Image (cartoon, helix red, strand yellow):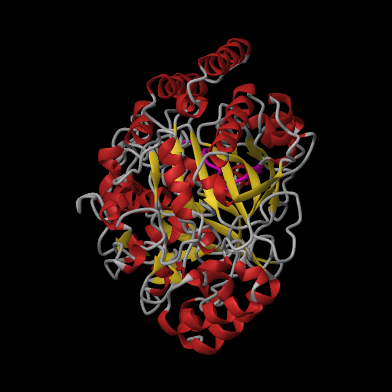
Amino acid sequence: MANSVLYTIAVLGAATPVFSSLVNRAAAEDASSFSAQSFDYIIVGAGNAGLTVASKLAADGTTKVGIIEAGQYLPNDALIDVPSNVGLNNNNPKYDWRFNTTQQVHLDNRTVAHARGKVVGGCTAINSLIFDRGSKEEYDAWAEVGNDGWDWAGLLPSFRASYNYTGMTEGQQIGSGFNISDENTQSHDILGSGGAIQVSQNTYYSDISVPYVKTTNSLNITINTAPDSGDPVGIYNPPASIDRKTGKRSYAAAYYTANLNKTNFVVLTGAQATKVNFLPNKQDGKIVASGVTFQVNGTSYVVNATKEVILSAGVFQSPQLLELSGIGNATLLQSHGITPLIDLPGVGENLQDHAMSAQMWQVKPGVKTWDQLRINQTFVAEAALQYNTTHDGIMSSGRSVLTFTSFKTTAGGNDTEYQGMLSTLEGWLNSTTQTPLQSKQYDIQKRWINEETAPGIEFLMVPIGGFTRTRVANETSYMTVLTVLQHPFSRGSVHINSSDPLELPNVDPRYLSSPFDLAALVQGLKFINKLVSSAPLSDLIDTRVDPATNSTTTQDFEQYVRASLQTIKHPIGTCAMAPQNLNGVVDSSLKVWGSANLRVVDASILPQHVAAHLQSTVYAIGEKAGDIIKSGRSTGATNNARSGDVQSLLTVTAIIVMVTLVTTIL
C-alpha cells in the first residue's frame, strides 16, 4: 500500500496547513521553565484519559495543570488524520513506543508486538477508530468487586460527556448492509452530545458488507439496533471517531487543542517521567506525592504539584512508574535496588488483553474491497480527490461490520463441543492457584458464559488482506475476519526490568496459559469458516489463504492459533481498581492504596475486561475521574484522605500521575 499512502499524504499536506503558532503556544514549552512553575496538578501522559481529566481540571481557568508527555504534538499528520491510513504508523518510533512481549510459552516462544501511542493523544492517535461500549453487566461487575459508583449507571453520564455523535444519513446507508433506521434508533439519553470527540458512521462500504451481514443473520445472529444501550450482542455498524465535517480522525488531542490558549493548561512534550517524588513525612500513615522527576534529552528535572500527582502513562508504564517510585511488590523492588515505600503486590499484575487470530480469504475477481487502495492507482487518485474535496469516501472511513456473540452461539448447536469447553475450564480452574481478585473475576466470567449476558467473542470483518502471515498478491483482493477473545482467563503481568527508568518494562500477557482461551478461539475460527462457506457470502469467495485449505481438524486450528495469535491492542488491569485485600492498586477514587494524593487514571485501573474496543471506556474514565477530583470526594472505603485535607495540613497538592497510553487500538 506504500504508493497509495504517499499519494494520500501529498494531497492532504497541500490541502491543510500546519498552524505552527498554536503548536508553539503549548507544545514547545521549555523544560526549565516548566519545572520552575507551580502547578496544582501534575499529570504524566497526554493520552486518552490524561488529556480528558486535565481538561476537566483546568476548565475553571484558575486551577493550573501541568502535563508531561514523552511524544510530540503532531497536528495535520496524514498517518494520524486520514482514517484509511489506520495501522500504518504502528512500529514507527515517531508514533509508537514499540513494545514487545516476553517470549510466550504457549505461542511456541514467539514474542508479540504491542503498539502503544507515543504522541499527544496517545493510543487514540494510532487505533482503528472504533467507538463502542461494553455491556451493562460488564461495567456492573466493576462495582461488584468493591468499586461503588463504577457501574453502568454511574458511568453512563461520563460516556456521554466525552463525545458528540452524528447519525447516519440517507446516503451513508447505501452498501452498508444496515438500514438507516437501524442506526438512528438509539435513545438520545444514551448517545453523546457536545463532547470534544466527534463520532459518526462510515461513508464507504466494500462489496462484502451486505452479503456478510445477511449471512451472519442466517446463522441466528441478528442486527443490533442499539449497541450502546448496554447490550452489544449481535451484528452492527460501529460508530467511528471520525469528524464527518473534515473526514479526519477525532482523537484525544482535541482536548489539547481546545486548551491551547489557556495559561493554566501547560503541556511539556518530549519529556519522559522517571519517578514520582514524595515528602519525607507521611500524613495519617500515607505517603504524600510532591512532584515528578522527568528527563529531556538526558537531563533530569523536577516539577512540583501542590495538590495531586496523576499517572496516566498507560497499562504498561503506569505500573512501571509506580515500581520505579517505590510502590509495588517489595521483594521485586528490592531485587532492583529500589527502597519500597508501599508494599503493594498487585502493581503490574492482573494484565488482561484481547487476543485475536485472523483468517484470510481470497475473493473472486471483480469483488471490490479496500485492497483497491493497494492495487488500483486510478481508484486511489479518485479517492484522494474525493477526500480532499468533500471529505468523505473510502479514505474517510474505518471498519464497518462488528459482531459480538456468546460461546454457545459460536458452538452452533454442537453441545458436545460446548460442554467440552466448559469441562476444560473447570478442570483448569480446579488445578490453578488464584489470587482473591482472580477468584471473584472467574466466578463472574463463568456466570457470563452460563447466562450469555456478556459476549465472549468478537468477529471483526476487515475487507482487505495483510493481517496474516501470508504476503498478499498483486492484483488480488481479500477478506479478513478477526476472531477476538473478549474475556480471557489467562492473566499476565508488567514489571520493571531494571531500575533504569528509560528501559521498557517486561510485558508478559501469558497468552493461552488457560486452555479455555485456546478452545474458545478455535471454536470462533470454526464458526467463521461455517459463515464464509454459507450463501450469499460464499458466492464472493474464491479460496481460503490462511490457514491453508488442508487445515480442517481441531488440532490444525489449535496449531494455527498458536502460530498466528496477535493482540488487538486492548491491554488492561495492571493497576486494578479493587479493595486492597483483593490485590487492588487503586481505590474507587483512583488513589493508590497507601498514598494521600497519588492517582492513576487510565486503562490500567480496569479490574476486569469488557467486550468493546477501549477508547470510549477510557474517555469515560477520564471524565469520571475529573468529576471525582473536582468534587473532593474520595470513595475508597479505607483510603479516604481528601485532597483538601492534604492541602490544609501540608500545603502540598497531590500529584495525579496519569499514565495515559491507552488503548485502544483496534
Residue 575 lies in magenta, yes or no? yes
Image: 232 above or below 477: above
The N terminus, quarter of image = bottom right
- Give residue 164's position: percent from left, percent from top: 30, 63
Q: Would you say 588 lies left or right of 441 here? A: left
Say if 508 sits above or below 428 in the image: below
Residue 222, by quadrant, is top left
Q: Which residues are magenta?
A: 566-576
Q: What is the chief secondary structure element of the magenta stretch? A: loop
- Foreground residue, 117 or 280? 117
Of 121 and 349, nearer the camera is 121
Towards the viewer: 372 or 61: 372
**Residue 76 at what x, y percent from top left?**
52, 79
Magenta-span inclusion, residue 165: no
Q: Quadrant of residue 475?
A: bottom right
Residue 90 position, x and y percent, is 65, 61
- In the rendering, at what x and y percent does residue 115 appear? 63, 54
